[in-house]
Image: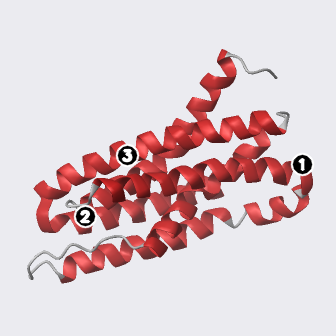
């Protein structure tokens, strides 16, 4: 395999495909916190980008070192994503319902919750390591960087869109954001067990 147009196109398409869950979670985060500062938006998009870039590279490393261990772990991926996203989404929705009568309180996503979101939305990207197993290390690294950059751009767009509609939806935004996270968790789970 060479560094050619097809390599870069495939890397971008991988990035777009892998970033869809992270985009939806970014949208939910933007809905939940419509007054989010731009530096925090870049930080959130950066966390998703780092996770989406690292996971395929870890998958590639697993293929080249410990394939038998990864296949045992891979059956738990849908369960991990379901539990993490449903608990975060359920808490967001519950807080939104609880605060419905009260004055709208903005509940910002914390660093630990953000790390869990990044992990949950990118854990399925480990399997990309299998599809790039014939790449050398440098090609796998370049592909991971392209996936990370693509994810960063897509998640930034999700945050901007979420912020815009979060302001318009007012107190319903936290509930909608939480339901989106629950839906994504269920979707990853269903895709993983089928």
Residue 156, which numbered label?
3
For residue 182, side relative to residue 190 (left or right): left
The reply to whether residue 194 is in sight is: no
Q: Which residue is mark 1?
A: 64
Q: Are marks 1 and 3 in contact (CB under 8 Å)?
A: no
Q: Residues within 10 Å of mark 3 (few under 14, many from 20)?
A: many
Residue at 56% x, 38% y: name it: 15
Q: Which residue is mark 2?
A: 33
How much space separates mark 1 and mark 3, taking CA atoms?
A: 33 Å
In the depicted structure, whether residue 41 falls above or below residue 150: below
Q: Residue at x 66, y 63 (%)?
A: 77
Q: Looking at the rendered structure, which numbered label has been put on residue 151? A: none
Q: Calculate the distance from the C-alpha at mark 1 to the C-alpha at mark 2.
A: 42 Å
Mark positioned earlier in the residue sequence (1 or 3): 1
Between disc 2 and disc 3, whose residue precedes? Answer: 2
Q: Dividing the image into 4 quarters, which one contains the N terminus?
A: top right
Q: In the rendering, at what x and y percent does residue 167 appear?
A: 14, 57
Q: Residue at x 8, y 81 (%)?
A: 101
As helix, strand or loop, the secondary structure at mark 1 comes to helix
Residue 110 placement, left or right of 60: left
- Residue 99 position by quadrant: bottom left
Tell which circle, 1 or 2, labels the residue nearer the N-terminal end. Answer: 2
Mark 2: which secondary structure? loop
Up the image or down, 111 lies above or below 125; here it is below
Q: Nearer the viewer, residue 16 or 68?
A: 16
Q: Position of residue 141 (x, y in %)?
A: 73, 40
The crowd level at tag 2 (other Cα within 10 Å; few <14, some 14-19, many 20+) is many
């Amino acid at each position: 395999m060479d560094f050619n147009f097809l390599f870069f196109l495939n890397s971008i398409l991988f990035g777009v495909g892998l970033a869809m869950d992270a985009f939806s979670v970014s949208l939910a985060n933007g809905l939940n916190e419509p007054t989010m500062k731009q530096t925090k938006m870049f930080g959130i998009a950066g966390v998703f980008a780092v996770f989406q870039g690292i996971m395929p590279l870890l998958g590639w490393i697993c293929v080249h070192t410990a394939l038998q261990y990864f296949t045992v772990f891979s059956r738990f991926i849908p369960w991990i994503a379901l539990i993490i996203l449903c608990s975060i989404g359920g808490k967001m929705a519950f807080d939104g319902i609880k605060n419905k009568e009260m004055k709208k309180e903005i509940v910002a996503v914390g660093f630990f919750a953000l790390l869990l979101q990044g992990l949950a939305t990118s854990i399925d990207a480990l399997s990309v390591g299998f599809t790039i197993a014939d790449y050398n290390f440098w090609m796998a690294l370049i592909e991971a960087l392209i996936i990370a950059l693509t994810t960063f751009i897509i998640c930034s767009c999700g945050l901007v869109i979420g912020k815009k509609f979060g302001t318009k939806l007012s107190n319903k935004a936290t509930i909608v954001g939480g339901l989106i996270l629950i839906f994504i968790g269920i979707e990853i789970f269903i895709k993983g067990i089928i």
